[in-house]
Amino acid sequence: MEKYSLTKKLGSGSFGCVWQAVNKHSGEVVAIKALKKSYSREKCLNLREVKCLRKLNHPNIVKVKELIVEKGNVFFVFECMQCNLYQLMEAKKQKQQLFSESAVKAWLFQVFRGLDYMHQQGYFHRDLKPENLLVSQGTIKIADFGLAREIDAFPPYTERVGTRWYRAPEILFKSGLYSSKVDMWAMGAIMAELLLFRPLFQGTDEADQMYKICSVLGSPTMDSWADGLRQAMAINYQFPQLSGVNLSALMPSASEDAINLIESLCSWDPCKRPTAAEALQHPFFKRCLYVPPHLRSTPAVAATRRGMLKQQGDRIDAEALPYPKIVKQLSPLDIMTAVQQNSAAGRKGQQSLANKAIAANRQPMGQMKLPSMKAGVQWNAESRDWFLGPFQNLEPGRIYNEKFG
């Protein structure tokens, strides 16, 4: 850690803190994640997050540059990105603007490429959300692998993973039996949010989350999710009986292909959701003009329509500011002290779906109210907006009311 000088704290969460830093020898700006817990070097190398990051190497997955273990303290050194998708949405909202569908298409195409690679390498993420999709100059990368899991690991898996608004129905049932298709559900919710500028399923607790899903998709049937109905019967749970809404009415500016892809990704039955590779073949991406970073600097590309898309991506990120000057150098002890001070445990207030009949006291949904994007219940730790560089006039990130296992 001696070769790095820290500039500022970027965020914190249940796993630790993240700092922006500069390599004193090369001048490179990086992000350093300090884990809250202490580990020996041997145990550190066996952490799922470490094994996952060491194995994955893809242009659309955030790159770990170095792993440092000092006196039991573990530090991940990452490349530093400019901002995350949630911050971009907030910046656009302040200007009362929406993303163009071409920009959304270019971002999602990259994320699905990263997901396809990750799943092929035997891992699924389990915590995809706008805050964990990082952007720099039109390139987007998947970050935060603290909840990543091996696909071929023996179930049952952790029952409560992922941020609630992006949590698949099979996880809400706490069965522990789920697959990489939970990532595809999250991608459907994220895609809708990029077009709506508000979460598609914005539940206040687990029971309300299932109600919100039924409100949008309609209650599951034997045709749409027979296994889910059997699971519900096994735990004495009754789905709220709602007919759902037309996604085209919710997102009038979205194309027919965009609506179709969202509906496919947010299928009740995990088996009916496409894989990441299948999503890349969807008609929505037929005219995707994404240009890989290594081609963007060539004059020939800059003169094409693809070059124009790259320039559009640059305009989206045009508010990014230079990195601030180094204010002081902190020792590993200073960092770990701050980690301990900022690692307050999340409020437990968890309620089982089986113990709360969410349909009994609710009326069928009429016209959906569009709540503020910033809405959400309080959490006593900051949202994990890790690996980010500074961005002008951006909200720090949403806050949630639970700690994930």
Image (cartoon, helix red, strand yellow):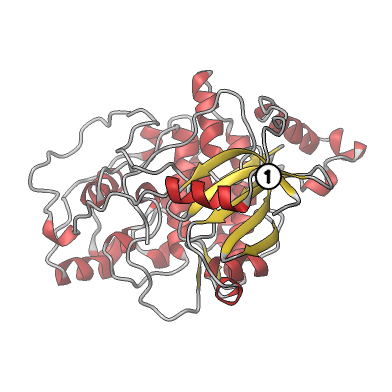
Residue at screen point 36% across, 28% down = 372
Would residue 281 be visible to someone looking at this image? no
Residue at screen point 34% across, 52% down = 345
Label tally: 1
Mark 1, secondary structure of its residue: loop
Would residue 94 be visible to someone looking at this image? yes
Q: Residue 31, how many percent across, how many down? A: 65, 47
Residue situated furthest bottom in the rendering: 154
Determine which quarter of the picture holds residue 370.
top left
Quadrant containing the N terminus in the rendered view: bottom right
Q: Is residue 81 above or below residue 370?
A: below
Q: Is residue 105 above or below residue 352?
A: above
Q: Is residue 86 above or below residue 264?
A: above
Residue at screen point 37% across, 48% down = 344
| 187 to the left or right of 116 | left
Q: Is residue 299 above or below residue 166?
A: above
- The type of residue carrying mark 1 is Cys
Q: Nearer the viewer, residue 246 or 122?
A: 122
Residue situated furthest left in the rendering: 360
Q: Residue 141, how many percent across, how many down? A: 63, 49
- How would you rate the neighbour count of disc 1 (Cα within 10 Å): few for under 14, some for 14-19, many for 20 or more? many
Q: Nearer the viewer, residue 248 or 386?
A: 386
Determine which quarter of the picture holds residue 173.
bottom left
Q: Nearer the viewer, residue 238 or 375?
A: 375
| 269 to the left or right of 16 | left
* Residue bearing mark 1: 80
Quadrant containing the C terminus in the rendered view: bottom left
Residue at screen point 38% across, 69% down = 178
